[in-house]
Image: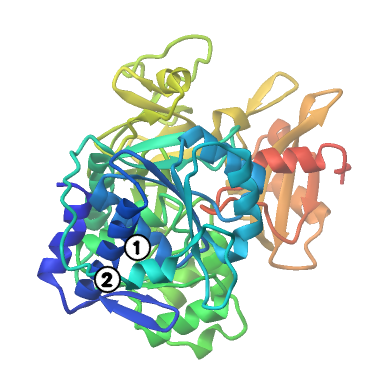
Amino acid sequence: MNIASLLNRSVDRYPDAIALVFDQRRWSYAQWNIRINRVAEALVDLGVRPFDRVALYLSTGEASVTVYFACQKIGAVVVPMNFRLAAGEVAHILQDSGARLLVYSHALARQAVQAQQQVNGVHDCIVVADEGEALAEGHYRYEMLAEQGGGQHEPDYCAAPGDLSALVYTSGTTGRAKGVMHTHANDLAIATNCTMEYSLAATDRALHIAPLYHVGGFQAFFLPHVMVGGLNVIEPRYRALSTLERIQSERITTLFAVPTQIQEMLFHPDFKRYDVSSLRMITTGGSAMSSTTMRHVLTDFCPGLFNGYGMTEASLTLLLHPRDALARLGSCGKPTLMSEARVVINDAGRDVRPDEMAAADEIGQLIVHGPQVMAGYWNNPGETKKRLKHGWLYTGDLFSRDASGYFTFHGRVDDMIVSGGENIYPREIEEALYRCPGVQEAAVVGLPDEKWGQVVTAFIVRSDPALSAEAVNEFCRNNGSVAAFKRPRRIQFVDELLTNPSGKVLKRELVRLYSKAVHPS
């Protein structure tokens, strides 16, 4: 099998079932497949050949998934890009990937054209634009390509399982974005893994509010629903009330949302106006959630809440099922069906082997093995060798595993705080802060300090506007879960935490912004 056959099987099994809903339009699997084939024919006519890279710089919408499948049918490699990237960042990815063709949204035309002019090799551009919107000279209008031609015949190409299907660039939270190589076999494994874990079926109706350029939103959520022949509703932009309206009107059964989105919807003054009873599953990840909020989610929003851990290099690897949501609050669960995971000792000074496992509850580095693990980093053998060793992916994330086999995240290896010679793991402090009344979200980093090297600093989003730094300090002193040397010495209240599209807090950015701005409370 390959990604094209994944789609074709659903087309054969459910030709008349609705596959896609976007912007007041609905396509059955048969209708959508014709549209995909037309785009595939257009790409071939423009000179795209197997293994050529096709870059997508698109707002969330139908075009991103249609072009993706069109590329799979002709053996091209998709390069999805964050639509929030600046022109220089887009140019870096275009140059690094060697993209031959760029598909972009008209609203991003200025950045797209600037990026194209900075690189060599991008021969053609396709623009997703409304009728009447002017295009740059020589650029093609997407809707015309998607509506013209036959589309009745399947492209005469069959990708091998080991062929590349996509280059997914990392979010850059640990440095400059790197191209993660996904093969057809990788992405089929990801889709199968998630289909089985979430018990997806053709009767499921998914709402897509997560970015489709991201593994969590596409490979781990959109692809699985196509695999089973489910309905996919794409929201062009997340907003709390429009999402609740969609859940009600489309009788949505499955949703992927980051914790901040879940909380924004749940605590919205108009939440109870909407009927969300059709939801059987919400899957989330990226940051912690307080026990109070978790109880509200389970009783008022959706009883089937999954909390997962994954990364671009391996997608969904650990998953906490709804039955454990409260009893194991703060845990990422156990390895998914197709994943093997271990915690090895954390010794940056040497090459740690997979059999050098940390003791129960000891913090070490998570390593992962399975068919979903990336083939490597594009044009980066040095980084590939560093991360793929002894048949395992060394994630660079700190975890512990308890005696019952549940994994708990403690932050990035790079996030560890060294204050006064002591190693401090931010996650355990964050977990304690989430138990403090009045705390909605929390992130802990180490800021530079002349005396201690780094000083533990907590960034807090309040659910109670009256919460003070003194009250937080008092809680940390008295709750018994944080040692004195680990307690935050600085507290900064913020309106929101800086996060990437997958919900992970951008701690490097917090350090950069607040190193000179935060004062002791």
162 is higher (above) or lower (below) than 355: below
Mark 1 neighbour class, 10 Å CA radius: few under 14, some 14 to 19, many 20 or more: many
The residue at the point 67 percent across, 52 percent down is 498
Gap in angstroms between the C-alphas marked 1 and 2: 8 Å
**Seen from this angle, which residue lies furthest left?**
13
Left or right, 48 with reference to 228: right
Q: What coloring was used for the rendering?
A: rainbow
Q: Tag 1, which secondary structure?
A: helix
Residue 375 position within the rendered picture, expressed as x and y whole percent measured from the top left: 32, 30
Return the residue at label 2.
32
Locate residue 282: give its quadrant: bottom left
Depth check, front residue: 328 or 240: 240
Q: Secondary structure at mark 2?
A: helix
Q: Are marks 1 and 2 in contact (CB under 8 Å)?
A: yes
The answer, for residue 21, to whether it is visible in the render is yes
Which one is nearer the viewer's eye here, 36 or 392?
A: 36
Picture residue at 52% right of the left edge, 90% below the top: 273
